Amino acid sequence: MEIQDIIRQQVTGNPIVLYMKGTPQFPQCGFSATAIQILKHCGVKQLFAVNVLENDEIRQGIKEFANWPTIPQLYVGGEFVGGCDIMRELYESGELQEMLAGVTPQE
């Protein structure tokens, strides 16, 4: 399977996907740590996180997939949302919470 097919499968097969450096428990860069904190503040409990540091093909492939040069990258409901700065802006405006509520099971 081609790397783009693997990424497409990850993005469309999970409601919330974050491509990041490190893991949610141990982020390896400040931007990834911020992205995780934003998602936690939004109440996200189920997240499919991909550590791009473990796979160079995914690390490069995700940049091509979204035509977005930086990591982290957030996908919600199969759609590319953006990186850390966009996540922060959407969180501050309340838009990210609405986006996430549409794909997150309500308790």
Image (spheres, rainbow, N blue to C red):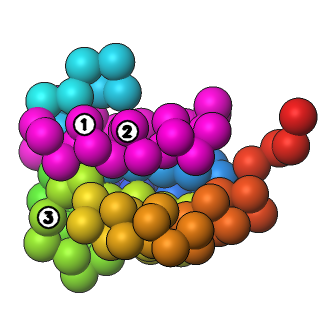
Q: Earlier in the sequence, mark 3 or mark 2?
A: 2
Q: Amino acid at mark 1?
A: Ala
Residue at the extreme right: 107
Nearer to me, 37 or 75:
37
- The residue labelled by disc 2 is 36
Q: Earlier in the sequence, mark 3 or mark 1?
A: 1
- Which segment did they paint magenta? 29-57
Quarter occupied by the C terminus: top right
Specify the farthest residue to the top: 25
Q: Which x, y percent locates residue 88? A: 35, 62
Report how far apart the C-alphas of labels 3 and 1 lie in the structure. 14 Å
Q: Are marks 3 and 1 in contact (CB under 8 Å)?
A: no
The spot of residue 22 in percent (x, y) is 21, 29
- Looking at the picture, tell me which residue is in the foreground, 63 or 90: 90
Q: Position of residue 98 (x, y in %)?
A: 68, 67
Of tags 3 and 1, the one toward the viewer is 1
Q: Is residue 29 left or right of residue 98?
A: left
Q: Residue furthest front?
A: 92
Q: Please state if 10 lies on the left or on the right of 25 as rendered.
A: right
Structural crowding at the residue carrying mark 1, measured as other residues with C-alpha within 10 Å and reported as few (<14), some (14–19) or many (≥20): many
Q: Residue drawn 12% across and 72% down?
A: 69
Task: Note whether residue 83 is visible.
Answer: no
Q: Residue at x 47, y 62 (%)?
A: 91
| Residue highlighted by disc 3 | 70
Amino acid at circle 3: Thr
Q: Residue at x 74, y 49 (%)?
A: 104
Query: Label for residue 25?
Result: none
Numbered mark located on residue 33 in the image: 1
Indicate the amino acid at tag 2.
Answer: Ile
For residue 71: magenta? no
